[in-house]
Amino acid sequence: MLIFLNTLFLPNDEQSTMSTLTITGIQTKLSWEDKKVNLEMFEEKIFSISQPTEIVVLPEMFSTGFSMQPERLAETMEGNTVQWMKKIAAGKKIILTGSVIIEEGGQYFNRLIWMLPNGQYGIYDKRHLFAYADEDQHYDPGSKRLIAAVKGWKINLLVCYDLRFPVWSRQSPPLPPARGLGGEAEYDLLIYVANWPERRNIAWKTLLQARAIENQCYVVGVNRVGEDGNNVYHCGDSMVVDPQGEILYHKKEEEDIFTVTLDKSHLDRVRDKFPFWKDGDRFTIENPR
């Protein structure tokens, strides 16, 4: 039996096919559970970006840090943080993404928001909740992927612990009639936003490369630095990886605002020369809980 993953395609205003995509990641310290300070800090950093960029990526729970206090910290989709994202995306004329704590219908979600400059947005609720830190006791899991479309690029957006579960991000091979005709991959770029601790940074770096190689796509992982309110240290290790596993950017320990331009023609050449993803298995994924 073949069951396709629930996937939302969110088109941008301009869908002309372009060969490049420029992305900026912000690797930074976060002030523990202090939304005002964090939003002011990110606003200053975002407006300090002088070179042209199209997408700005913030870490997981960028307004609070990785907190297990959603009852106290959660906002609705009409709250201050989402309104701030709308203001920044419009003012800087960028797509802005990162995850925040959201309450909806009496449930709490670690929700990635993909904010367009025109105020439209898509959402992805983190599917794999980090039970080791009791995230599953405070938040509800999502069940749908978000694949956004920008300038002819398709982008799969995921959060931190999702990185450890390759099936959730796995490219689905084309149906048999298309296999000999080229087919088309589900997405071209994976973005992971994270609060990934230093003590497990080998897994973070290794799996970012693995996801790029096995899915023949670019991967961008944006992590934070510094200690959180639980004295857990984060060393960053934000990375950009090409579809062959080559590291295009990597930074450890230091705060950094980095900008990379990804080349679609390089991705197409890799997929045409080594079309490994087409030989993958089709499979079923059950919804959580």
Image (cartoon, rainbow, N blue to C red):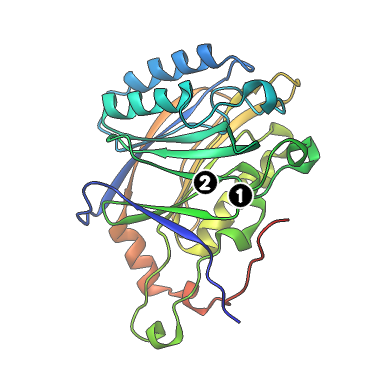
Q: Is residue 250 above or below residue 74?
A: below
Q: Amino acid at mark 1?
A: Gly
Q: Is residue 31 above or below residue 269?
A: above
Give the percent coordinates (x, y) of residue 23: 36, 39
Whether residues under marks 1 and 2 lie with C-beta atoms below 8 angstroms apart, the answer is yes
Q: Which mark is residue 113?
A: none
The crowd level at tag 1 (other Cα within 10 Å; few <14, some 14-19, many 20+) is some
Give the percent coordinates (x, y) of residue 161: 66, 45
- Quadrant for the N terminus, please: bottom right
Q: Quadrant of residue 267?
A: bottom left
**First reached walking from the N terminus: tag 1 or tag 2:** 2
Q: Disc 2 designates what residue?
A: 124
Give the percent coordinates (x, y) of residue 40: 45, 13
Front position in the image: 169 or 253: 169
Marks 1 and 2, Cα distance to the nearest angstrom? 7 Å
Position of residue 225 in the picture relative to residue 180 (left or right): right
Front position in the image: 124 or 43: 124
Q: Amino acid at mark 2?
A: Tyr
Q: Disc 1 designates what residue?
A: 142
Q: Quadrant of residue 84?
A: top left
Please name the residue shown 30% across and 38% down the image.
54
Please name the residue shown 35% across and 73% down the image.
272
- Quadrant for the C terminus, please: bottom right
